[in-house]
Amino acid sequence: MHALTPPGTSPAFLSDRPPPSKASSPAVTFFPDAASALLCPHPIHESLTNHSLLFFSFYIKPLPVNFYTPPSKQFLSPLIISKEYFEIPWAQLRSMVEPSFAERTLIKHSEYLTEATIIQSHATKVTNREVQTADGRTFPFDYLVVATGHPAPHQVHRKDRLRHFQQGMYYEKIKASNSILIIGGGPTGVELAGEIAVDFPEKKVTIVHKGSRLIEFIGQKASTKTFNWLIKKKVEVILGQTVDLDTVSEGGVYVTSGGERITADCHFVCIGKPVASSWLHDSILKHSLDKKGQLIVDENLRVKGHTNIFAIGDITDVPELKLGFLAEKHAGVVAKNVKLSIKGAPEKKFAVYKASPPIAMVSLGRKEGVAQLPFGTLFGCLPGKIKSKDLFVGKTRKTLGLKSE
């Protein structure tokens, strides 16, 4: 099991997830932040003879799932999604400082889902029995899985997203800047600072974080070691303060809530953002949303007030870190419960999901990292070897049936 940084914090688009893993039928395999169709194994296929199963993830960083078996001779459930490609999201930060890295991290769905039914559109409305899309189509369902996660990059086509990196929108911005401000000291902000500090040691990097310490969900000792690692890399860290971007003056002068003035040639916002659920406010699920815009689910991951609608991943109100490998566990529970529901099994037999304790891994440049595990924290080369070198890109590609390079 791989622990990665939690999603939801980004320089306008970033979010970290763990690589997918294979599971025996009829478990579900979660394709993190991918736009993939759902492939149902034969046991579910037999149950679904007279039922339709619809999954959607759209216009966002989706959390689609795959009812895994080998990719042939399967019942294919449609997935509603806006992008034509799967982006390995936890590799985006590396692509910002090494644009060529993006070539391996952007994968067209057609390369690995050769038989899948993918509806490339935005879902705009949900009723009790159908989903409507922006292009005017309607898709009926007996069971629905909502996996919409957080807002994603706007580029719909792979070539446009690749150009976004290769033409150096981020790389050139970083390269041309002498000083860089990172707003947010969570996992994404820390990882971005680490990538820049290692690849561009001559840059002046400053992190402003509203918390009392970096990456609050990890242990105090590991957080302190992370702080010291950044200081050693000449990264300035300002804690307990925020930055109002509306007050930036000419010459790139940023003023913190504590009155400190920071001069920077560019900035990246790496703070949490809301889940992509605003479209649900006018749907049958509007009363199932909490104050954060998350779908309220029960212990079986069914959406509040509905017996045939499930939710997985960041969109749920499950009280745990929003991590890809946990969304994979969500998917396994939902796969089992959909099958049991179709068979008419009593609810007491349904799979129950229990929130996970904090567990994550954060890269510090290309060779080091920090990991929060159930038994404590690890810091240094070991977590670095696990995640930092290739960021699981080769492993992820192999899992999708593709060459690692």
Image (cartoon, grey):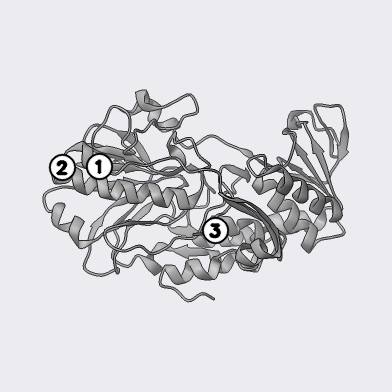
Q: Position of residue 29 (x, y in %)?
A: 37, 58
Using residue 105 as the reference point, say whether residue 256 is left or right of it. Answer: right
Q: CA distance from mark 1 to mark 3?
A: 43 Å
Identify the residue position indicated by label 2 in the image: 345
Q: Residues within 10 Å of mark 1 (few under 14, many from 20)?
A: some
Going from N to C along the chain, the mark reached first, 2 or 1, is: 2
Residue 26 visible (yes or no):
yes
In which image quadrant can residue 258 be found?
top right
SS type, badge 2: loop
Residue 160 has which mark? Answer: 3
Residue 120 visible (yes or no):
no
Name the residue rendered at 43%, 48% in the picture.
327
Q: Residues within 10 Å of mark 3 (few under 14, many from 20)?
A: few
Name the residue rendered at 65%, 44% in the picture.
218
Q: Position of residue 51 (x, y in %)?
A: 15, 47
Judging depth in this view, the residue of 264 and 363 nearest the camera is: 363
Residue 314, compared with residue 288, is above or below; it is below
Type of amino acid under label 1? Phe
Using residue 12 as the reference point, say whether residue 276 is left or right of it. Answer: left
In which image quadrant can residue 201 be found?
bottom right
Q: Are marks 2 and 1 in contact (CB under 8 Å)?
A: yes
Name the residue rendered at 44%, 33% in the picture.
317
Q: Position of residue 346 (x, y in %)?
A: 17, 38
Type of amino acid under label 3? Asp
Of the two numbered discs 1 and 3 in the rendering, the one whose residue sits closer to the viewer: 1
Going from N to C along the chain, the mark reached first, 3 or 2, is: 3
Residue 294, compared with residue 141, is above or below; it is above
Q: Residues within 10 Å of mark 2 (few under 14, many from 20)?
A: few
Residue 350 has which mark? Answer: 1
Judging depth in this view, the residue of 124 and 238 nearest the camera is: 238
